[in-house]
Amino acid sequence: MKNILITGGAGFIGSHVVRLFVNKYPDYHIYNLDALTYAGNLANLDDIKDKSNYTFVKGDINDAAFLTDLFAQHRFDGVIHLAAESHVDRSITNPLAFVMTNVIGTVNLLNAAKQQWKDELDKHLFYHVSTDEVYGSLHNPEDFFLETTPYDPQSPYSASKASSDHFVRAYRNTYKMRTVISNCSNNYGPNQFPEKLLPLMIHNIQKNKPLPVYGKGENVRDWLFVIDHARAIDMVYHEGKDGETYNIGGFNEWKNIDIVHLLCRVMDKKLGRAEGESAKLITFVKDRAGHDLRYAIDATKIMNELGWKPSLQFEEGMEKTVDWYLSNNDWLENITSGVYQSYYEKQYAER
Ligand code: NAD
Ligand code: DAU
């Protein structure tokens, strides 16, 4: 039995990764370490919580002493690190929280792994799941982010993720730890916290509330179904080469305003509304400070070297996502009552 530590497994992407590993690898024991911040939700993993090869551990990667204890109790064969503060808007109002978890928390985890693996650092893998935002913002429509694109983070969130990527590489260079990093574009799908564009819009359409599009809606993102990201993480963990970086993306670029219109059309159909009804809710609001114009990933390397490719067409993924939110209304209601309400009111009152 191999013990794998997955951090951030109660969040959006982490929960899909944990599910995939628990179901696909009965000879792995998956430890899901998560602090259960506002973004962590054990309801995301209800279907696998009683599996014998799964253990949830509540804990904070900012707490170095806690990590030392955890690594004293279990020997881990590998670490897949997803725990992070993940929302750009929150990083603009509270950058320090992003430095703490994304930078210090990552270094704490690297230290705990280094200490445990000290005599056999070449036998274990530390995998950091990162973002395309570390590369900055594209302005020329013909450009794409490659693994060799220099880092140029523009928001406190992306600066913190870039910093943690640098620490991971520094631990490989300095201590000879085996590491891999992947940088992925925007994920969408079931279980995404409704502070992010698509679930926020789905929720607001249901409630007939304004759909706040930042600026003119001209910013471009590349969208990938979360389960395709989880499949890529599985491949990178098992087949990725030591010290390498893999870009992951959907070759699926959309302007924000166009994706919101597409979502409105899907929602009109699903809710039995007249065509164009939901789009009437679109409201242009004050832009995000320092808003990156365009992200676009060139995922050729992972496709050629590891044989990964996205499995879903975007329209199909979008329908699946909308269907999931509409049939999991309790999940959404539980999250959007209470603390979310005050976050939402503060965030959007200022726009
Ligand atoms: P999320 O916000 O949904 O989940 C983050 C999880 O980390 C939560 O369960 C939270 O409780 C946990 N966490 C936060 N701080 C912690 C701490 N101090 N200690 C332990 N656990 C803590 O995030 P997500 O969207 O699922 O992103 C997961 C990872 O993937 C992040 O590292 C993010 O940077 C990266 N990423 C996300 C996307 C995307 O589109 N969402 C794209 C590329 C990369
Ligand atoms: O590119 C990968 C990144 O994608 C991840 O690393 C981040 O963790 C993840 O949050 C996401 O970052 P974005 O900032 O691109 O995602 P978000 O859903 O916040 O916004 C997507 C786009 O939509 C962005 O251009 C801002 C815009 N937007 C967002 C919200 C929440 C709006 O126009 N209105 C909104 O209400």
Image: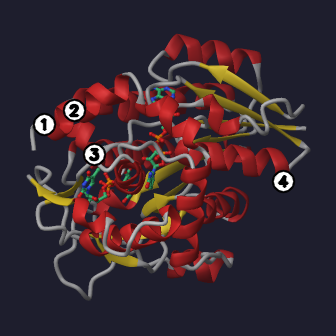
Considering only order in the chain, which callout, 4 or 3, is on the residue closer to the N terminus?
4
Tell which of 314 and 342 is nearer to you: 342
**Distance from Cα at disc 3 to Cα at disc 4:** 32 Å
Choose top left, top right, bottom left or bottom right for residue 1.
top right
Left/right of residue 52 with respect to residue 128 in the rendered view: right
In the image, what residue occupies the spot 53% across and 29% down?
A: 109
- Disc 1 residue type? Ala
**Distance from Cα at disc 3 to Cα at disc 1:** 17 Å
- Are there few (<14), some (14-19), or many (20+) residues within 10 Å of tag 1? few
Instruction: Identify residue for label 2.
Output: 345
Q: Which mark is residue 24?
A: 4
- Disc 3 residue type? Val
**Distance from Cα at disc 1 to Cα at disc 4:** 45 Å
Considering only order in the chain, which callout, 2 or 3, is on the residue closer to the N terminus?
3
The kind of secondary structure element at disc 1 is: helix
Q: Nearer the viewer, mark 4 or mark 2?
A: 2
Asked if disc 1 and disc 2 are in contact, CB closer than 8 Å, the reply is yes
Instruction: Identify residue for label 3.
Output: 88
Asked if disc 3 and disc 4 are in contact, CB closer than 8 Å, the reply is no
